[in-house]
Amino acid sequence: MKTWQLFEKSLLTAGAAALFTACGAPAEEPAAEQDWEATLTSEEQGLLASCDPVELGEVAEHACVHAELGPFESVTAATLGAPVLVDVSLPHTAYNVTLPATGFCGWGGRVGFIPDESGEFAFLLSRHRGVRIYDAATGAEVTRECRYSVPTSVCGDLKTAIVADLEGGTEYHLQFLAIAERNSEFTLVIEEAAHDHSEE
């Protein structure tokens, strides 16, 4: 009888772990003081190279001004799988993004971005989890070049930057996911990574 109960308990535990893994959550619950989204990015951090801290530090300092002072635009991302009608292409703008609920796996959505010119762009976020970028026409995922964890000494309002090389005039879909509800609302600032921000 006890052996059967242990077997049932093992099955339940394995099923719960598989469910969390399918939703993108860690198999083990992080400590209470840890940020779930920071834990979830450990795999992403391993896959992405670290950005140049000097170059991205300057970009983050400039973006921080917008994150603190604006101008601000509030947007609600399109539900995953739905047409993307929300655009975040205005330069030097802090977008306050809200993700719609996706069901039992948390929150997620997409917004559109069309760069004016070709080059490297930094997507700076007020949360630890980053962004995935897709070509709107083909659905192909764009390679993210590097990741930068923004030190609080550089900016207290932004936590993460992801850099990608994009083609001017091409529409991209930026996809965001969140497990914890508190991370379903965040600030997004997009800046040209190679642009000289020191004079602005």
Image: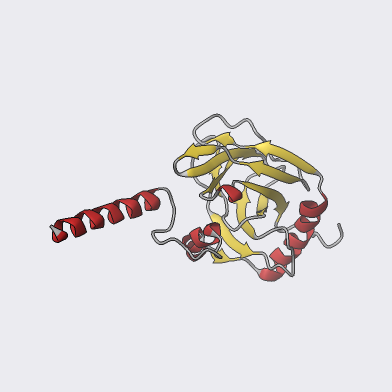
Rendered residue at 76%/56% (across/down)? 63
Furthest residue in direction right, as rendered: 199
Rendered residue at 61%/52% (across/down)? 165
The one of 32 and 173 positioned closer to us in this rendering: 32
Q: Quadrant of the C terminus?
A: bottom right
Q: Is residue 82 above or below residue 146?
A: above
Does the image show residue 156? yes
Q: Is residue 188 left or right of residue 3?
A: right
- Which quadrant of the view contains residue 127? bottom right
Q: Quadrant of the N terminus?
A: bottom left
Q: Is residue 48 above or below residue 82?
A: below
Rendered residue at 53%/38% (across/down)? 101
Q: Position of residue 58 (x, y in %)?
A: 76, 64
Q: Is residue 24 left or right of residue 79?
A: left
Q: Position of residue 128 (x, y in %)?
A: 59, 58
Q: Position of residue 95 (x, y in %)?
A: 72, 44
How is the model colour-coded?
Answer: secondary structure
Rendered residue at 30%/51% (across/down)? 15
Does the image show residue 171? no
Q: Is residue 175 left or right of residue 159?
A: left
The one of 165 and 72 positioned closer to us in this rendering: 72
Furthest residue in direction front, as rendered: 1
Q: Position of residue 86 (x, y in %)?
A: 65, 34
The one of 68 and 16 positioned closer to us in this rendering: 16
